Amino acid sequence: MYLPIDMFKNIIEYTPLISIDLVVVNGADEILLGWRSNRPAKDSWFVPGGRIQKNETMDNAFKRLTLNELGMEFQLHQAELIGPFEHFYEDNVTGDDYNTHYIALGYKLLVDNIKLKLPTEQHSKYTWMNTDDLLSNSKVHRHSRWYFDSSAQ
């Protein structure tokens, strides 16, 4: 269920959001990152993902998010749960007048990157990085680095 922006802004201001972050790994053990076009985390490399909607099961959310973010639908059972993470941002999707709090469920998903049809709604461009490059690249958002280096939390 998509909400009118005024209602959604109220929710962001007063409650945490629940999301699924996709740690997408190809056969060369590289991780997919997109250059964020929107707040929060705008202008940084970030893993694909998105919010779970009201009355949407995690299974259905995973299918919707993988289709929307990767151009291919995957099932939740095809992924491995990395764990829950808390993400705090100083801004929100509409501005910087209040922060955003996410409970992000990180899932590792192995893919054939040739078959992906990556959209440009949330990310303006994409790259594949190995773990060492991801951890050392200052343009990779810290919340995305956390999936590979728990000591950084």
Image (tube, rainbow, N blue to C red):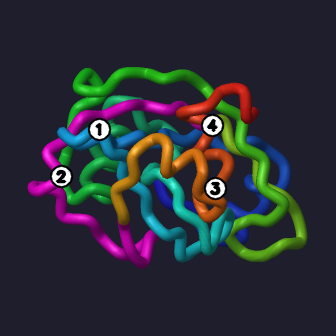
Determine whether label 1 and label 4 are within 8 Å by CB: no
The residue beneath circle 4 is 146
Tell which tag, 3 or 1, sits nearer the viewer.
1
Can you name the residue that lies furthest to the left here? 115
In the foreground, 68 or 79: 79
Residue for badge 3: 141
User: In the rendering, which numbered label is found on residue 29?
Assistant: 1
Please rate how many residues cluster around mark 3, counting C-alpha atoms within 10 Å: few if below 14, some from 14 to 19, many from 20.
many
Task: Locate residue 151, reporting x and y percent.
Answer: 72, 27
Callout 4: helix, strand or loop? loop
Quadrant of the drawing holding the C terminus: top right
Confirm or deny contact between disc 2 and disc 1 (CB under 8 A).
Answer: no
Q: Which mark is residue 113?
A: 2
Q: CA distance from mark 2 to mark 1?
A: 11 Å
Above-or-below relation of 116 to 109: below
Instruction: Tell me: 38 left or right of 131.
Output: right
Mark found first going from the N terminus, 4 or 3: 3
Residue positioned 59% across, 57% down in the render: 137
Of the numbered discs 2 and 4, the one sitting upstream in the chain is: 2
What amino acid is at disc 2?
A: Asn
Q: Give the SS element for disc 2.
A: helix
The extreme right residue here reads 97
Q: Earlier in the sequence, mark 3 or mark 2?
A: 2
Q: Is residue 118 left or right of residue 37?
A: left
Give, as a single range, the part of the protein colored magenta: 104-126
